[in-house]
Image (cartoon, grey):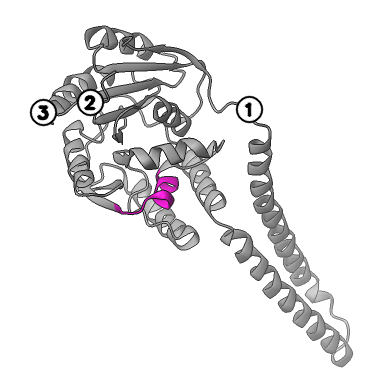
Amino acid sequence: MIIPEISVVIPVYNEEDGLPPLFARLYPALDALGTSYEVIFINDGSSDRSAALLREQFEQRPEVTRVILLAANAGQHMAILAGFEYARGQIIVTLDADLQNPPEEIRKVIAKMHEGHDYVGSIRRQRQDNAFRSAASRLMNHLREKTTRIRITDQGNMLRAYSRRVVETINSCKEVSTFIPALAYTFAARPTEVIVEHEERAAGESKYSIYSLIRLNFDLMTGFSLVPLQWFSMLGILVSLGSAALFVLLIVRRLIVGPEAEGLFTLFALMFFLIGLALFGIGLLGEYVGRVYLQVRHRPRYLIDAVLERQP
């Protein structure tokens, strides 16, 4: 069995219209690198013709193409983990199927890996997203860095390269819910980043909604740090001290001025604030407990229906 130098892992979910232009650009870009490679497509339970197109592409280039067909939608990161399990290359590159990261930019992350780095992230030179999405991403990046100490300039960009050692360490973790670039950053000895081009989607629509982005950042903060719980504990102490001071103030005021009905609504507002704060704390604690619950069930992270590959 020939071990390729580069494995390109591409999750695919309902990308029927975008796959033909991806095939047309991806293989020439990899051929131009002048080294051995393999492309691993993971069909993440697509409901369109994506699986059929991947099968056709495998039949056209079976010597460098492998296709993993998942039995059901497992999510982008779980699909990538399935690809990591099957990747054989010394350098593993992840890429989106929507062509927002041009395949021609793979050479940049490969060049950085050849310089001795074991993890290479990418930064979009000019994002082709709307203003709200870009601003929300910058805000979440700043919050994540302050919370987890993981420095990833552009966490939403899929084009990244990982060394064999980092990928094998990720595979050994067996986490049910994780964010792969952040996990790789914690394992890397020499991480770096490189600026790459960014294009509009070739076809279709983004699979990430606002809820998905919020969900992702919850996973980041609760999966890599206890700081949110510590922040809330400190906030609870401050609120308790403030409530105690307000209670003493109201007692003194009642003794000096007498009872006042006008202050009733102020007390209601304060009570609602404290109730909301308590509910937020319960939700935050539930996030951590939920992660433990998902992990201890030991259910498989994904189910593989079939693997298309040429037998050695």
Pinpoint residue 290: horizontal percent, then vertical percent. 67, 42
Q: Is residue 34 magenta?
A: no
Q: According to the image, label 1 marks what residue?
A: 299
Residue type at the position of mark 3: Ala
Q: Is residue 68 above or below residue 146?
A: above
Q: Residue at x 30, y 41 (%)?
A: 160
Query: In the rendered structure, which segment of residues is drawn in magenta?
Result: 181-191
The single residue placed furthest to the front in the displayed view is 1
Q: Is residue 22 above or below residue 92?
A: above
Report the Cα–Cα distance between label 3 and label 2.
11 Å
Displayed quadrant of residue 200: top left
Q: According to the image, label 3 marks what residue?
A: 32
Q: According to the image, label 2 marks what residue?
A: 37
Instruction: Please tell me whether mark 3 sits on a helix, a strand or a loop.
Output: loop
**Of callouts 3 and 1, the N-terminal one:** 3
Residue type at the position of mark 1: Arg
Q: Total label count? A: 3
